[in-house]
Amino acid sequence: MVRKELHLDEAIINALETEAKKQQRSLKNYLENLVIKEASKLEVPSKEYTKMMDNLLDKFDNNEIEFSSINDVMIRNGLSN
C-alpha cells in the first residue's frame, strides 16, 4: 500500500467531510472509495466496455446480430441519392 499526502483547501475538506457524513463514512473511507471509483474509469479498456463487447461477441456467436448493408443504412437515414 502506498501513502500520499494531499494539500487541500479547508473549504474543500469541509465539503468532503459533509458528504462523507451523509454517506455514514469516515473522510478517509469516503476519499478512498471516491478515488477507486474514478480510477476504475481510467482502465483501458474499462470494465463497462469489456462487458459490452463480450455481450456483442456472444450475440454474434449465436447469430443474434443482424447486419445491414451501407446502402440500407444510408436509405434508413435519408442519405441515399
Image (cartoon, grey):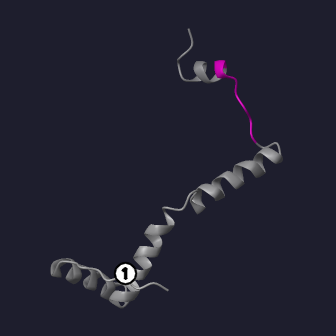
Q: Which residue is mark 1?
A: 31
What residue do we see at 70% from left, 54% from top?
55
- What span is in magenta? 65-71
Q: Position of residue 4 (x, y in %)?
A: 36, 82
- Tag 1's secondary structure? helix
What residue do we see at 77% from left, 52% from top?
58
The C terminus sits in image quarter: top right
Q: Quadrant of residue 18?
A: bottom left
Would you say 7 lies left or right of 67 here? left
What is the three-letter code of the residue carrying label 1?
Leu
Q: Quadrant of residue 9?
A: bottom left
Front residue of this view, candidates 73 and 17? 17
Which residue is farthest right?
A: 62
Decide: is 70 above or below 33.
Answer: above
Q: How many marks?
A: 1
Decide: is 35 above or below 5.
Answer: above
Would you say 10 lies left or right of 80 here? left
